[in-house]
Amino acid sequence: MSLPEFFFDRVTADIRQQMDGVLALADQLARQRLTPDAQACVSGVAEAAEGVRRMLDAALDLRAVTTAGLTSNPVPLQLREVVDEVQARWQPAAAMSGVTLLVSYDGDRDACAMADGARLLQVFDGFVGEAIAGSRRGAVEASLRAFVEADGGVRIEGRVRGARDPAWEAQDMEARIRELDERFGLSVALGVMLARRIVKAMGGTMRAEGNAGAAETVVFEFQLAATLEAPAEAPAEPARSAHILVVDDNATNRMVAQALCEMFDCTCESATDGIEAVEAARGGRFDLILMDIKMPNMDGVAATRAIRALSGPVSTVPIIALTANADPEDAEGYLAAGMNGVVEKPMKPEHLLAALQSALGEDAEAAAA
């Protein structure tokens, strides 16, 4: 990795982490008793932070697709859920723009296929975002149709109808993307470019259809493998709440972790370095410790070893590493030091939930024994 690439990765990772922190702080503020004007300010901060994070994620994904190719994770997917998510994502933005968003699904209500739902949503996001940005009034239509083929496969056709600029017909794609950036902003331009790259990389086809009036429909199609397997259900929350020690020298990171823990009705205490963590762990009042790795005074690995060296049940409390360095080699070192697992930063709710389930499950089994 070249030095510019190293700094690009470090800067973007740090920005993502900071935006997660801003969103967590905004969520905490939104739960307070604030005046209407203050609530509006908090909502504005959260919206701006979410916009920055989406734009950064799109830029990183576009870079990865362009340089290393598309990564995809097909799983059993109920196709109707895709349009439900499109509706939920874009209805607020459409309403703010004075645009009516019409979303529909045509096909077997319970039809399933092997597909990467996140990638399909990115395609819709790009074209719906473009359509809403270009429509000052009227309606934007987004639809998904599912066709069962004779060979048992499933062909899906996505359609997004929005405003049409006749001048675009004479432009190549690079010129069109640049104009999107100038007219609607970088977020829209990135979304459209990423959507087009995904369609191509997934072996799909795409075309534009002119409609009566100043409208255009973008049509994209994919061939998917059918499946009779039902989509996996969302994991259940832990059977009981946990008391968690959050160890991190960064105040924003602690706030993010605490906010996520509270999502699952867990209670928290915090420590700012490994020395404080070891002293707090002596009390034996924690069900789980979320341990940052890089900290002053005593790092997370040394703190874990010190806790494991304590006497009594406190030495067995589950400890989960919180780190941006979650490569397999790094993870092996954390496990060898006595940790029970690794959650990568920026931390996601589903990853924390899995850690809680694992820790509380092990705790329940030990109690039963």
Image (cartoon, grey):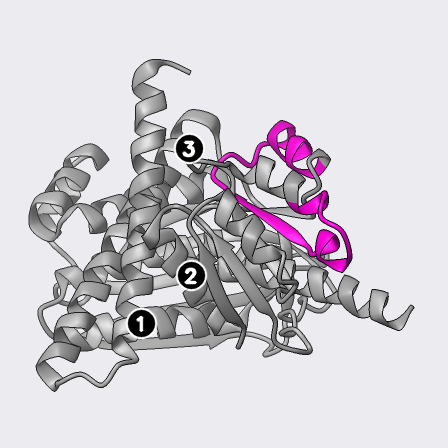
Q: Quadrant of residue 177?
A: top left
Indicate the amino acid at tag 3: Ala
110 up-or-down from 128: above or below: below
Q: Which residue is mark 1?
A: 28
Q: Is residue 329 covered in magenta?
A: yes
Indicate the amino acid at tag 1: Gln
Q: Nearer the viewer, mark 1 or mark 2?
A: 1
- Circle 2 SS class: strand
In the image, which disc is placed on residue 10?
Answer: none
Rounded to the nearest angstrom, the CA distance separating label 3 from label 1 is 33 Å
Q: Which residue is mark 3?
A: 64
Q: Nearer the viewer, mark 3 or mark 1?
A: 1
Q: Residue at x 70, y 48 (%)?
A: 340
- Residue 202 pos. (x, y %): 51, 42
Query: Which badge, 3 or 2, comes first in the chain's sequence?
Result: 3
Q: Residue at x 16, y 44 (%)?
A: 169
Q: Which residue is mark 2?
A: 158
